[in-house]
Image (tube, coloured by chain):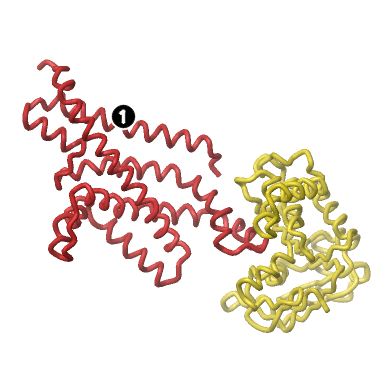
Chain colours: A red, B yellow
Amino acid sequence: MEFEWTVVVDALPALLKGARLTILIALAGLTGGLVVGFVSGLMRAYGNAAVNGLAFTYIELIRGTPIVVQVMFIYFALPTLADIRVDPLTAAIIAIVVNAGAYIAEIVRGAFLSVHKGLREAGLALGLPVWKVLVYIIGPVAFRRMIPPLGNQFIVSLKDTSLFIVIGVGELTRQGQEIMAANFRAVEIWSAVAILYLVMTGTLTLILRVTEKRMRIL
Amino acid sequence: MSIVEFKKVTKRFGALLVLDQIDLSIEAGEVVVVIGPSGSGKSTLLRCINALELIDGGNLIVDGISVRAGGSKVRLIRQEAGMVFQQFNLFPQMTALQNVAFGPQRVRGLSRREARRQAREMLAKVGLADRVDHYPGELSGGQQQRVAIARALAVKPKLMLFDEPTSALDPELRHEVLRVMQALAEEGMTMIVVTHEIAFARKVGTRLVFMEDGKIAVDGSPSDLLDSPDNVRLQEFLQHVA
């Protein structure tokens, strides 16, 4: 068969609109996921038994269930269960926040705990309170170690947004699906969709690489 | 009043008794060298003073504050008791200057500018004026340990604790650290030094404490004890390290 470039050109505006939505969901979701992940990761690393247990339960619940089930739960089950109604876009963002948060929590915990305990002692020995030791000494060292695994998670979450096709969010994959259903040009459309994902993940990889280079990994 | 006073201090790690009813008073201006076989409790003794290890029994008063007083009081003790570690423990993401300026700025609340000025002074004092912008990873062990000493001094403590400061160093790098410590002692700094450097004990120490099995076995003048030890275990120990 012939690869019809005009099909791609015609589809491009709709696909780019979808890509914009994908970026929005990933960006908002990962920002929230970072906050949730830092808080629950630090709860796991430094909390007492109760606090630790709470974070552990959250992480295990999320890591133990597929993200599609999670978003279905948020979008379809929550309205009947608790009368909480959200639009598809909000449900998608919440799903990324909750899902990425659980994985990021383990990244954060691992990075903080991997920092040599001598640094903590040196900070404490100067007369600093524990929180300042975490913020000024352990945190910066841990953060550098988090960059590679965080990059992984960012890419995974960005691609996970394609699963929100199941709740009808008009992100990139959904747009592709809709156009394909109308013109049946699978090769052109899915090639274009794949390349748009590659451009997004490629940009992310580039940003992470620059960040990593500018920070000496310790 | 003694600057450090151990009163029947006990410390356990699980079933192991590491410090067994230690009584010890240290006055301002003393340079106390603590020696003893490994596992005798000398590092633990030191780490109890700034509450990096919590004591299980008795009491320990440092600069008028009990190590059992908790949180903010313990931080006051730590500000007055600078510590130098065997493994240096410099902050790897900071230059030598940032390491030394960190305490004055974040603990003493000095302005960044003033903290840096003092840090330069401290680094010059330990002979590292030309290394201020180097990261710890770019310095030799001896240089790192001297930065660590400057970092502890920058907070202006009344007392300095040294936990085997030369044990991680190659022999030819040890003297540069010991020289800095000697200069500090000559300025009148109160120092408690856990070490295996017998020559340093003899030359700089004003008092020698020999520990064994969680107890202070011998406590006295370095020259007397080192020249004519009447404790059999101290004799054996000195033969092994000499």
The secondary structure type at the circle numbered 1 is helix
Residue A208 x/y as whole percent = 43, 37
Pick whichever, A209 or B45, lies toward us: A209
Give the image quarter of residue B238: bottom right
The image quadrant where one finds the N terminus of chain B is: bottom right
Left or right position of B57 against B179: left
Which chain does the residue under circle 1 lie in? A
Q: Which residue is mark 1?
A: A199
Residue drawn at the location 35% of the way across and 43% of the way down: A154
Residue lying at the far top of the rendered structure: A2
In the picture, measured across the screen, residue A158 lies left or right of residue B42, that is: left
Quadrant housing the C terminus of chain B: bottom right
In the image, residue A140 lies at what x, y percent? 54, 49
**Tag 1: amino acid:** Val
- Say if residue B188 shows up in the picture: yes
The answer to whether residue B171 is seen in the rendering is no
